[in-house]
Image: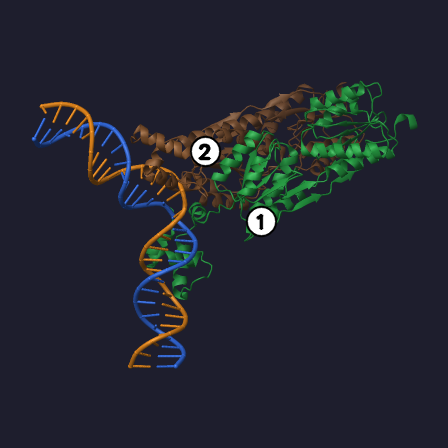
Chain colours: A green, B brown, C blue, D orange
Amino acid sequence: MVVTLKDIAIRAGVHVSTVSRVLRGKETQQVSPQTRKLILSIAEELSYTPNLLARAFRLKKTHTIALLIPDISNAFFARIARSIEIQSYNAGYTLVVCNTDEEQAKENQYLNSLKSRSIDGFIIAPVQDSKQQIIDLINNKIPFVLIDRRFDDLETNAVISDNEKASFYATEYLSRYQHKRIGFICGRKRLYTIKKRLVGFQKAVKQFQLDDNPEMIVGDGFTIEDGFRATQKLMALEHPPTAIISSGNVLTIGIMKAIHERDLSIPRDISLVGFTDSFCVPYWNPPLTTISHPLHQMGHEAFELLLKHLQAKETLAPRQITIKTKFHERHSVDQPKIYN
Amino acid sequence: MVVTLKDIAIRAGVHVSTVSRVLRGKETQQVSPQTRKLILSIAEELSYTPNLLARAFRLKKTHTIALLIPDISNAFFARIARSIEIQSYNAGYTLVVCNTDEEQAKENQYLNSLKSRSIDGFIIAPVQDSKQQIIDLINNKIPFVLIDRRFDDLETNAVISDNEKASFYATEYLSRYQHKRIGFICGRKRLYTIKKRLVGFQKAVKQFQLDDNPEMIVGDGFTIEDGFRATQKLMALEHPPTAIISSGNVLTIGIMKAIHERDLSIPRDISLVGFTDSFCVPYWNPPLTTISHPLHQMGHEAFELLLKHLQAKETLAPRQITIKTKFHERHSVDQPKIYN
DNA sequence: ACGTTTCCAGCAATCGTTTGTTCTATTTAA
DNA sequence: TTAAATAGAACAAACGATTGCTGGAAACGT
């Protein structure tokens, strides 16, 4: 049978509160050395382990945090998850993983269910169809950190990467190679990160006086097929782009496929820069010039921030942390033909 | 404040047990229609949600399961995890994800910590340095299902894929293309799946009278670099293989890199078959002929099996489920040059 | 009219831990 | 010597939900 404080108390001939104090009590009350030694030895002998469920119930602290992300089988979030898991393990927290599939209803359901399970804190990549449940978290004073996305008009903890700057820089980089017509393949436009990348792109288009034909911005979806079709659409324009920025991961494969199927070559005929985090990118043909997110660091910062809030006595002021992205120069960008 | 049964009881002028029976009680005892209606309406009005922590404590059922895998950022396990998460969500279970990093100590620590949190059941890709903690689970009658790996001498629930057959078939396939010298790049030899693949490979080598030089079996590790080095080792042999089987995922990129760096071409100079599950494999150059695991199905079966055990009144007999792998014929296999 | 059954709801214990309060000896101070 | 201080440990309530048991009243049968 499983050993409880009571079992130890009976064996030691003391009261269970005394046992509790010895085994757990912050030294708020004294216990004589011999009693302490006795209890400790009996606990050892019976190999007592505290019932964490009972403790959690009593203390209203489960030492559990939940991670809400769109999809754990998406490498981007899997790596964030991994980084968070490592730390929660080290900090003695249990990690619950929830996939929202970018559906607000699922996010809401999860949040409600997890709240009634008294989860201590949340790390959330919010769906952002609504912000009500986030406001509820604030009102209920439940500690949480947003990751990858935030609400620009809500003062919450958040760890995001600087997609706008990254996109601006990628565009600037291409314009330095004399590209004037740059296509931008979005993925899903309604996502926070994509919106920011678009803003950065458009700012650069203005600043460097590039072709700002709205038809240069295409795509809605992250699959290979989506990338393929978006690229076809770009290539079918009267003045097709000489360079493409891919705002997605898997997406990019479809782009390359479409380019190759037209018997065009990267970067000779068309240049390509991707927001692409896959480890195999450097081994593609050609190795792709990409922007990558320091996912490990994002997870790290998010957990650390959450932990601070969990351990704080009083409510802390929310913090926004922006992580710099990295630009990896490889071999998918060259000057457009006309300049060669 | 958060609403409890007591609050409702007071408002309704009844005892909390009555409230509990109305809101939750399997109709083991009758409650008059008017009382029921009153309680229901008050519960609705106060928007009562049960404290699942208290219930879990009382009932010793947390409605939580844990998934122990080597690494969630490994796409193989991420996809299994995803499939399990979908179902646990649908079944009303919360999923805790734990990474063992193939370290027995971590697996043990997790198992202990989770046991004291009264997790209902486990799905485990065991590290297999030891089987003691699995035996403990059996003895403690804690429901669990092994996944991807099992102990051949332990009667437990398990969902695995048929690596031996798959490997045998891949070898047979290559031998049909007249390959006589086939290299096998392992990944980590001590893993259950790898051992099985080796067995299948060696059986086929015997049966089809291929070169059974033990130097044809190389590699120890799953990184790109590991694959690169293993391939170099194979190519440095006096009689290098005309075909390679890759028993890994990322690994395979290293193999291709090593081949291309020698200015050899796949499949003209060397054929390649991989146990490679990445979605982008069809878009590689050349598209790789692979064996894939029905990961979604594995996760599905594993959860279903676990659920059966969780819901069963008495202890069920353990079941082993073996899932067929899939062979995808693409363009990385041809006859060796000598026959062309 | 009295005994038996049925219906409905309250009572109380319980799960294991934590922690403020109380109690009893013993020590210390005056 | 007596009052006050202190150490050490027991007491008891509490967290919220569940459930076997008890009991009163109404309904039913003979």
Q: Chain of mark 1?
A: A
The amino acid type of the residue labelled 1 equals His
Q: Residues within 10 Å of mark 2 (few under 14, many from 20)?
A: many
Give the CA distance from mark 2 to mark 1: 42 Å
In the picture, measured across the screen, residue D10 lies left or right of residue B156, that is: left
Is C28 on the left-hand or right-hand side of A213?
Answer: left
Pair 2/1: label in front: 1
- Chain for disc number 2: B
Crowd rating for badge 1 (residues with CA inside 10 Å; few <14, some 14–19, many 20+): many
Q: Is residue B220 visible?
A: no
Coordinates of residue A300 in the picture (x, y in percent): 64, 45
Q: Quadrant of the C terminus of chain B?
A: top right
Which mark is drawn over residue B206?
none
Q: SS of the residue at dot 1?
A: helix
- Could you tell me if residue A14 is visible in this image? yes
Residue B329 percent coordinates (x, y): 67, 20
Q: In the picture, residue A272 is in which quadrant?
A: top right
Q: Who is closer to the viewer here, A178 or B315?
A: A178
Q: SS class of the residue under badge 2?
A: loop
Would you name the residue on which mark 1 appears?
A309
Location of residue A21 (image quadrant): bottom left
Picture quadrant of residue B211: top right
Above or below, A153 relative to B285: below
**Nearer to the camera, A121 or B159:** A121
Horizontal side of B338 relative to A300 (left or right) equals right
Q: Give how far across and how far down residue A242 sits, in percent.
A: 84, 26
Residue B304 screen position, x and y as percent: 47, 28
Q: Are marks 2 and 1 in contact (CB under 8 Å)?
A: no
Q: Amino acid at mark 2?
A: Thr
The residue singled out by tag 2 in the image is B156
Q: Please give the name of the residue rendered at 65% of the width and 34% of the height, measured from the top-left corner.
A: A75
